[in-house]
Image (tube, grey):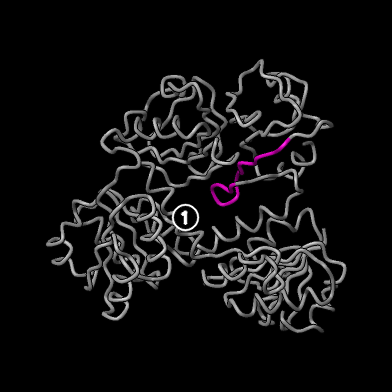
Amino acid sequence: MHVVIVGAGEVGTTIAENLAADHNVVVIDIDADRVDSLQYEIDVLTIAGDGTALSTLESANVAKADLFIASTDDDQTNLVACGTAKTLSDVFTIARTRSVEYLRTWERTETAFGADFVVCTDLLSAETVVRVIGLPAAIDVDPFAGGLVQMAEFKIHPESPVAGQTVAEADRFDSLTFAGLFRNGDMILPTGQTVINPNDRAVVIGSPESVQAFATDINPGTTPGAADEIVIVGGSAIGYQVARLLEQRGFKPRLIERDADRARWLAEQLPKTTVMQHDATDTGFLSREHVDKADVVVSALDSDEKNLLASVLAKRVGADRVLSIVDSGDYVTLFEEVGIDVVINPRQVTAEEIIKYTYETVAENLAVLENDAAEVVELELSANSELVGVPIAELVPSLDAELVIGAITRNRSFVTPRGDTVLQPGDHVIIFVETSYVNELTGMA
């Protein structure tokens, strides 16, 4: 494809890196120094200019483009850029926004702003937080096949009952597949005899019920989905959306917001949330409000530095599990190294959502894992697919890639993949695969 990306920040760069090997990519950014450096980092064509200007988009040959992605940090710029692109051709346009209001406007007609698809960073991040909250020890959760299948990545803590067990011992569930392990930066495709080590990250794919049950095995002291003591630190746009989504699921979270006017507004908008107007970095306040007893603390302040301090303090006073929103990808490793349980980078979440639309239509869904080391891809198999008609035990070894078929849905029913299972046209297949093989795999579906 010919793909034009407006914005060479973290989101745009991540998308460009993912696409550069297989597509013709043009990246536009108003910062000339940034596009110059990007040209040496990635094999893409770069243009220094205003991505909303007709002349700039003509230089990028948008008239012949298959996909146009506006991913700057400014909502209005992205929406105007999509509208401008539509004056040149009927290219498929994707706009990134932080504002949920722009998303709601677009949803009314799905033609507003000249955008064919709108990705809302704040809402996506909040949805990710809420999914992770429901699974003890999970650091990433994604639904597949319309919710019939769930992929989850878990960190195996040293005290976990499954640490030291073999995969065969830990996998007691008929509808669960151990897809992969990440250990010291390496990806392992486990067999039944593979030992699960402390600090491994385990990726499992299965029915939501089996994934929930496995989560309980990993952390038996916590009941999945019943973390009734949830504290949100910061009434930012993401913090507000997290509280709103939790209320919809029957939770009654507490939210700490320092600004009096913002706290008052939050209290009016969130009837089931207890809003406390205070400084969340006051350890005395945290102790008085029993934050140490919280099942989950979500740090969603408006800067990474403040989030780091609040997250560390929450861990220090004894909070069971801390999730932190980290805006800069450069800080993700730092948060993990100081012991924060789950780190969610809104820019990475947004890039992942946009990347889904760059695959052929056969790729129904995907999740990116461990800094793009592997992906979980959902494929709908056609009658001409190279993957149908062969038992999985013969099919997988014939493919020149590290992959695991994690789950199958057939006629909206869950099918557990076994060695003698034969894939059929119309099946939805969820596959754990090394990133470098994804494009070739989608071409076989």
**Residue 293 placement, left or right of 385:** left
Residue drawn at x 57%, y 28% is 414
Q: Main secondary structure of the magenta part?
A: strand
Q: Where 112 sits versus 294, above or below?
A: below
Front-lying residue, 258 or 309: 258
Q: Is residue 198 above or below residue 26?
A: above
Q: Is residue 370 magenta?
A: yes
The verdict on residue 355 being magenta is: no
Q: Quadrant of residue 388?
A: top right
Indicate left or right for 372 with 440 as reference: left
Q: Nearer the viewer, residue 411 or 13?
A: 411
Quadrant for the N terminus in the image:
bottom right
Q: Residues within 10 Å of mark 1 (few under 14, many from 20)?
A: some
Callout count: 1
Q: Residue furthest right?
A: 64
Residue drawn at x 72%, y 79% is 51
- What amino acid is found at the position of numbered circle 1 in the picture? Glu
- Left or right, 270 with respect to 377, comes to left
- Expressed as whole percent of the image width and height from the top left, the position of residue 322 reads 32, 54
Q: Which residues are magenta?
A: 367-380
Q: Residue furthest top?
A: 420
Residue at (29% x, 33% y) in the render: 220
Task: Looking at the picture, tell me which residue is in the foreground, 241 or 332.
Answer: 241
Where residue 282 appears, as percent x and y from the top left, is 19, 70
Residue 344 lies, in percent from the top left, at 45, 57
x, y (%) of residue 107? Answer: 61, 64
Residue behind mark 1: 127
Q: Residue at x 60, y 24 (%)?
A: 415
* Element on which disc 1 rests: helix
In the image, residue 434 sits, relative to residue 340, either above or below, namely above
Q: Tell me the quarter of the image containing the C terminus.
A: top right
Which quarter of the picture shows residue 53?
bottom right
